[in-house]
Image (cartoon, rainbow, N blue to C red):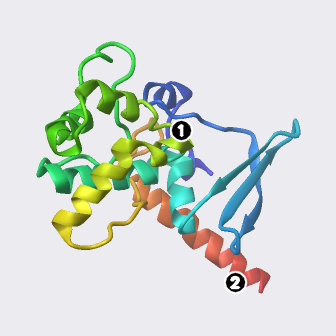
């Protein structure tokens, strides 16, 4: 268990991640592609996934982090500006009004997207919600990137986040975490036969 306790609560809050503790996974529905969890108080959560590894990554990096990292990848391809695929779009707290790297890259696309800086910011602020995938920004960035790349781009990628914390003594990433949980899950499923 020590290997998967990654950061204190303050770290998650600083990174705009809603941390759900005290939940136990109750169901993985491979047909519907959902993961459900419940708490001792009777609360339930259900999340959809394309590949289970994205849910494992999102558990660590924040809900929708895999979708957001795919958006960042598309924005990077369309703008030609390298971005960290961390799933985080806008700054929070002190300095929140100053655009971060993702917002800056997407703003360079503003004329091609036919969107103002204000409209871009408004849509990026929805990054922590399910509805972001239905925004004008999301759709137009993917359309532009796919025209440039001449291929369909994935709508989820494992975020590339370096994990930090008092118990972490070696280089670990969200990808390592997601793969580790996925391996354990596969072993459990295999044992259950």
**Left or right: where 183 falls relative to 43:** left
Quadrant of residue 146 within the rendered picture: bottom left
Dot 1 surroundings within 10 Å: few (below 14), some, or many (20 or more)? few
| Residue 9, horizontal then vertical, whole percent | 55, 28
Tell me, yes or no, if residue 43 can be seen here. Answer: yes
Dot 2 surroundings within 10 Å: few (below 14), some, or many (20 or more)? few
Give me the residue at 48% from left, 47% from top.
Answer: 134
Q: Residue 102 carries which label?
A: none
Quadrant of residue 136 within the rendered picture: top left
Give me the residue at 13% from left, 47% from top.
Answer: 81
Number of numbered callouts drawn: 2
| Residue 190, horizontal then vertical, whole percent | 69, 83
Q: Provide the secondary structure element on which disc 1 rests.
A: loop
Q: Name the residue under label 2.
A: 190
Q: Provide the secondary structure element on which disc 2 rests.
A: helix
Give me the residue at 40% from left, 48% from top.
Answer: 68
| Residue 98, horizontal then vertical, whole percent | 24, 19
| Residue 109, horizontal then vertical, whole percent | 17, 42
**Left or right: where 110 falls relative to 30:** left
Quadrant the C terminus occupies: bottom right
Give me the residue at 25% from left, 46% from top.
Answer: 84
**Direction front: furthest residue:** 114
Query: Which is more toward the observer, 68 or 12?
Result: 68
**Left or right: where 61 falls relative to 111:** right
Q: Which of marks 2 and 1 is in front?
A: 1
For the residues labelled 2 and 1, the Cα–Cα distance comes to 34 Å
Q: Mark 1 points at which residue?
A: 129
Query: Which is more toward the observer, 107 or 7?
Result: 107
Query: Which is more toward the observer, 143 or 72?
Result: 143
Query: Which is more toward the observer, 150 or 92?
Result: 150
């Amino acid at each position: 268990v020590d290997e998967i306790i990654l950061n204190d609560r303050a770290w998650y809050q600083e990174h705009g991640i809603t941390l759900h503790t005290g939940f136990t996974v109750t169901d993985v529905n491979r047909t519907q592609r959902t993961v459900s969890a419940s708490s001792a108080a009777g609360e339930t959560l259900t999340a959809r996934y394309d590949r289970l590894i994205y849910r494992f990554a999102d558990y660590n990096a924040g809900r929708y982090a895999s979708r957001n990292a795919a958006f960042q990848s598309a924005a990077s391809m369309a703008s030609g500006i390298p971005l960290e695929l961390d799933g985080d779009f806008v700054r929070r707290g002190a300095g929140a009004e100053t655009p971060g790297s993702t917002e800056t890259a997407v703003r360079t696309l503003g004329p091609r997207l036919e969107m103002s800086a204000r409209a871009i910011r408004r849509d990026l602020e929805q990054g922590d919600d399910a509805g972001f995938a239905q925004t004008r920004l999301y759709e137009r960035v993917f359309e532009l990137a796919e025209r440039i790349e001449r291929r369909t781009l994935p709508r989820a990628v494992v975020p590339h986040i370096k994990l930090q914390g008092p118990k972490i003594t070696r280089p670990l990433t969200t990808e390592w975490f997601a793969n580790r949980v996925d391996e354990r899950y596969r072993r459990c499923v295999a044992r259950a036969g």
